[in-house]
Amino acid sequence: MSVRRQLQDGILSSLWGLVSTHPGKIIGAGLILALVSTLISFTFLSLNSNQDSLVSSDVPFQKRYLEHLYNFGDQEYLYVVIKTGGTEAGKKGAIRFAEALNGRLARHQDLIQSVYYRISPGDLGSGALLFASPQEAKTLTNAVLFLAPSMERWLKDRSLSGFLETVAHLMNGSEAEVHGADPGIMVQGLHLLRDFLKNMDHILQGKENYSPILDLSRAGSRYFFTSDGSLLIMRLLPHKDFGTMDVIGRPLHVVRQAIKATQGEFPGVQAGLTGRPALQADEMETTNRDMTRASVIALLLIAILFMAILHGWLRPLLLLIALLMGVAWSFGFATITVGRLNLLSIVFALVLVGIGVDFGIHMVMRYVETTRRGSDVDSAVRTTIFRTGPGIILGAITSVCAFYSVIGSDFIGLAELGLIGGTGVLLCLLSMLTVLPAMLLIAGRKKLFPSSVPRVTGLPFLERLSRRPGWTLLIFGAITVAGLPGLLNVRFNYNLLELQARGLESVEYERTLIHTADESTWYAILTAPDLEDARRLTGTIEALPCVAKVESILDFIPEDQALKSAIYKAAARALGRIPANSLHTPPPDRDRLLRALSRLSGALEMLEERLFAAGATSELALIDQVLDYCRKAFGLIQENGNRAERLKVLQTGLVGDMEKGLLQLKVWLSAGSVTPTDLPPSLRDLYVGKDGAYQIKILPKGDVWDFDTLEHFISALRRVDPHVSGVPVGVFESARMMHRTFLMAAGLTMILVSLILWLYSRSFRYVFLTLLPLGVSMLWLLELMGWVGLHFNLANFFAIPILIAIGVDGGVHLLARWSELRRKRPDPGGLFFTSTPTAVALSFATTMIGFGGLMFAQHRGLASLGWIMVFGSFMGMMACLLVLPPMLKLTGHR
Amino acid sequence: MYTLRSAFIFFVSAVLLLCLTPALSGETLDFAVIQPGQPGTCQEAQPVMDALADYLGKKMGNGISIRGRYFNEVDRAVNFLKGTPPAWGIVRLGFYLKQARRFGMTALTSTRPGGYDKDVWRLVVKRDFQGRWESIRGKVLGNMLFETEAAACLLFGRPPERLPFALTGTFRPLRALRRVMRGKAAGAVLDGAQYRSLEALPLFKQVKVVHESGDLPKSPVVWFGPTDERSKRLTGVLMAMKEDKDAEVLLKLLQTDGFGPADRDLSGIGEGKRWMDCLR
């Protein structure tokens, strides 16, 4: 007897000795350990759903990204995309929508840190007016010079009637010196006048109080429209909670509720939410829903299958208990060693269920087969341990190889999954070799199993197929060769957006954004130590054809500052002469008010005539409204003179607003220059890091989710500066790293498995035959994928290590049983009369059922995983049952 | 002999210098915008004239002096033209038809208010009016009706004395329309721009069109006297304004989309001939 055999027998004897003498204690100990594990897991095991933690911080691209994150803070936005239809009316509607939504979100500052959708003079600090073009500066100066005398006159008077008279006077245009003034200014003025007179009417009727009409800090706000004007973009920075699966679950809920409410207010405006955090949260929700549905279906189908094959509910229940104990111990192990689960390692329990249950199936099937042949309970359990145990251990070790092969990876997420999953397989094995036999022993001794025995233990009809092994292999060989062209069609699709469910709002709006020329939810980042370098980099990058837009602090440092400052000097001087203090405002005078309103009506009518003659339809409608409010106010005061008293509040508010505006204007017009330090912190901090470096955001052109476009974009930027960082770089490098890791893991697993099989058997033929079903099934799978157009992606590539694990497992068990039969008889027909092929088929079937529910998942990545697992398992089953037995017969292996 | 030759050279040089000087510097290109019946005052419109003069001065080159005047009354405009005729002007269609021969006007380009090449005048009355336009009696108002004869020919193809109602000019076309609604006038004539304005007002539902002119030319840009190199340069500058970013605001102030080629009907052929015959 070989040393290996002696060792194996020694271990199994000890195991049997322990199980047969202390089954209760084993179960008790396992149970206590499971309870303790569950308790410490609930208490100490945390979840880290931060995607940035999936890759080692020592990897250069990740290190740079984390440094950026620390330096400039989290700037991963949610994007509210508001459609305008490209029309002016649509744009106005979008602005109203955005303002209303902003108002709603302002109530949730604990969840939404900041909202960016417009830039207003108030956001730009004291140098706001330096952002105007020289022509605009001239126009503004002219307007100020034109208005200043009237304003000065009125501020000496400070009465409401004086104000109305001044407006009428200006409208008559007798002093018009507005060279080059844009008529658009008149329209803005009419809007303000309409709102003012409307407010006046409401105050006269006692309906409302004074509402400010002119807020200079908001005047001339620029909204974040895309260059074609088809979309208005709102960027929202949500608070993140990496202790929850969906990270931004609460903010997302609040934002969606706010959008829904705003849509109720503006039913004609189409808007939706996207951005990386929204996509991730939606993906998490979709996958959770898909997984839950698939799990329920799988559980039901597997339960029915087990009850049918294992006869009754007790055997499946015992198997399940043993499995759950193994999983619970694994949780305990994860808590003690790693202490947290990440977005990848969180699936380890599902993987353990898929692989661990197979160990139990082989054990229970062998137990059933042995008892059916008339053995007593103790003998049946002993036979199970001694005959099936080695195969299970070998299968488990090969599975562990698949998991442990990624432990050294820089992809921390995978490495942790490898450690926890691999060790979990070993713990499940331990449970199946100790707790399960102990429970079978006790239940058997107490005659708790049904008296009748299961009928489906063998698959005799397959025996006939292997009677002509040469022909069988020839036929399958021909099919394999015919399918080879399919291999050429298999691709690896890196596009993460194509993994997402169709019809999801975040996905659809992401596509909408992709089709616009200059907006993207992903942007690359470069840093420059000083403004000069930032200018140089920005210039170089803007010239790249793959770049849509570059954002930096330079956008907020105006050009030609000295020139514009000089233009504003005259206006500043003119305003400087106007005193600003609101100590006295005269009481509203009824008669003077009526005269002023009458004069204003006359001026408006004259203006209306001019607009009518010019065909200015929209302005005409506006002036019609202004006239209407003016006449109403006149009527209300004329009707009851005491009402004029109510206008005191309007007069005081107006004077206050005007003086405030005047002061603000004086500050703006006197500003000398703007440097980054002059900008408000809320703006500066977006572009200037803690270390004083300047951040340059680079938005890609085209569909950056497409890997070729992404690669081209990153390569182009790396030629400018190799230290480019940001989400596109992270996604690009992570995807490549994941691909590389999986390929290396698959290769390493195959080498380790081959080595272990050789060490176990010292026979290359044994290694070849064990791996034959795996090799054949993988080839068939790839061929089939090519023919049906199913491609690998970052979600389904995970199927390969699992398929390797269960594929090897099937070969190991069939070969073990074949050898066992050969030891009894030189010509061992009847492999299919034993329970092993049934157990192997059942193992594959459970995998197919387990993942089959995913085939119809909404999440396309999960669905493709489901299809590959079902195809792969089916091919594995076919290769194990139809290719390996004829090959064993043909080669006469023992 | 030497002295005589030097004197002759000096004389020839002086004559040449005197002849060439106006072409090189000190040139004027004053203009007048004549829009009889346009609401507002000349004083109000003067800043726009100055802005146009300023723009053209820059575009036409150094040394050219340009001043602009605005008139919305026929008599004052005619007096001005008789006294100090400018180089060019923008005149209303009726004024052009009536005064073109007298002041030697040549159409250079045409204005394009609202982006339209052609204008249409419409006679509108109260909606409850029954019958054809010929049955209208009383006063018909319109701001293009100060040139009564030209307006009658353009709109009805016959002189005013053969019309059953009186055409009366007004500076307030909207008020005229309201007078029609109150029954104080029989009808109002609106040009294309005014009719588009009317369509935007609630008043539109209370009126109806009883007669329409055919396609009419828009107000032309005219040259007073024989055209020359300067008129060609001016035409070029005006025609290029639509594409010029610097002219964006100015065009809005002038209430035109730009300047297009001169209307063929103004050269006295086709429709133009018919109008001229009517006026004679």
Image (tube, coloured by chain):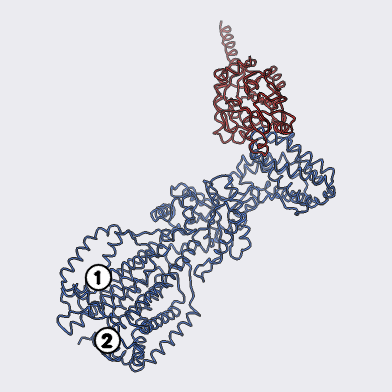
Question: Are the residues under badges 1 and 2 in a single subunit?
Answer: yes
Q: Position of residue A606 (x, y in %)?
A: 73, 35
Q: Give me the disc on residue A1.
A: none
Q: Position of residue B270 (x, y in %)?
A: 54, 19
In the rendered image, what is the letter of the chain coloured blue? Answer: A
Q: Is residue A733 left or right of residue A813?
A: right
The answer for which chain carries disc 2 is A
What is the three-letter code of the residue carrying label 1? Ala
- Residue picked out by circle 2: A372
Q: Nearer the viewer, residue A307 or A53?
A: A307
Say whether residue B87 is visible.
no
Q: Nearer the viewer, residue A176 or A271?
A: A271
Could you say whether the residue bearing mark 2 is in a helix, strand or loop?
Answer: helix
What is the three-letter code of the residue carrying label 2? Arg
The answer for which chain carries disc 1 is A
Q: Position of residue B40 (x, y in %)?
A: 72, 31
Give the answer, above or below, for where A227 lies relative to A837: above
Give the answer, above or below, for where A288 lies relative to B95: below
Residue A835 placement: quadrant = bottom left
Q: Give me the disc on residue A879.
A: 1
Q: Colour of chain B?
A: red
Which residue sits furthest front? B130
Task: Classify the position of the C terminus of chain B by image quarter.
Answer: top right
Q: Residues within 10 Å of mark 1 (few under 14, many from 20)?
A: many
Which residue sits furthest top? B1
Task: Classify the position of the N terminus of chain B by image quarter.
Answer: top right
Give the answer, above or below, for where B79 lies relative to A808: above
Q: Nearer the viewer, residue A838 or A712?
A: A838
